[in-house]
Image (tube, helix red, strand yellow):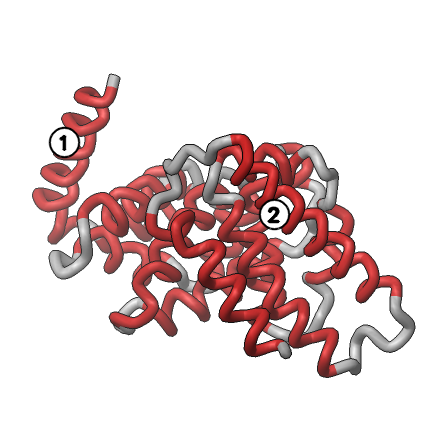
Amino acid sequence: MIINLRQICFLLTLSIQLNRFIILDNDILDYYCQIIDSFINILYSIIQSDNKINNKLSHSLIGTIIPNLYTMTLSKQLEKYIQNKHIISLILKLTNFENDEIQLNAFKILSSITTEQETKNIDTSDNIADLFIKFLNKVIDDSNQTLRFYNLLRCLKHLIQYDQIKDELTKQNGLPLIIRCATDIKFKPLQVQQPALEILFALTFNKEAYQQLVVALVDDLDFVLSRFLFFLIIRQDSF
């Protein structure tokens, strides 16, 4: 049953994964909103269950639902709908599950639906940094995990705006990984290098990270500047 549900969810969210700027017409939007409501109701039922932590079926259901719930946040229309459901407290409870995949996807959802003040109130910055470093290392060279790689960088780009995340990413030696994303020519400029450069730029507002970046990027300065100018030109053309 779980396998069939995963396959159905994958097919339902595939178009959003491939094109997050897609505009859903009203009928399709309503259909997705009903799915979101069902997902949220299931999650509430699991959280309120007495044996939620040890129940393998519950873990499997959560493991199926939350990555697809995150995928729906890639659509601006659905992201707004999910934000209006006020589920931050629910998703925060999922971060307590002792399962890296569940925790990571919960944090990815939070990165999309929380405001700056709400993010500041999330006292799990060390865990967030650890999970993102762990999973970026896992997928960075895996050609079968390309979309996940892009989405991880997208989420981290949002979360890195907050000081506690900057601190933890720096403390946990995450900078070399982000520098590689920004400077390795095998990565796509828009999907990988641009968000990585934006993450590095945000990190320059952290004193320790800034000092590390000055040393680490001195040999790649010309490349970084050329990439930065390239993205400035692209952004100018979009105005």
Measure the C-alpha gap from mark 1 to mark 2: 31 Å
Residue topped by disc 1 = 229
Give 199 or 63, whichever is nearer the viewer. Answer: 63
Quick one: SS at disc 2? helix
Task: Say whether residue 33 is left or right of residue 203.
Answer: right
> Mark 1 touching mark 2, by CB under 8 A?
no
Report if residue 45 is visible in the image: yes
Quadrant in which residue 80 is drawn: top right
Nearer mark to the viewer, of 1 and 2? 2
Residue 41, percent from left and from top: 77, 54
> Which label belongs to residue 162?
none
Residue 91, percent from left and from top: 70, 53
Q: Residue furthest front?
A: 27
Residue found at x 71% / y 70%: 97
Q: Is residue 66 above or below residue 122?
A: below
Residue found at x 36% / y 39%: 204
Task: Say whether residue 25 is left or right of residue 80.
Answer: left
Quadrant in which residue 26 is drawn: top right
Residue found at x 37% / y 36%: 21
Q: Is residue 25 above or below residue 223?
A: above
- Amino acid marked by disc 2: Leu
- Quadrant in which the N terminus is drawn: bottom right
Report if residue 208 is visible in the image: no
- Mark 1 neighbour class, 10 Å CA radius: few under 14, some 14 to 19, many 20 or more: few
- Quadrant in which the C terminus is drawn: top left
Residue topped by disc 2 = 110
Residue 231, percent from left and from top: 19, 33
Dot placed on the residue nearer the N-terminal end, 1 or 2:
2
- Amino acid marked by disc 1: Leu
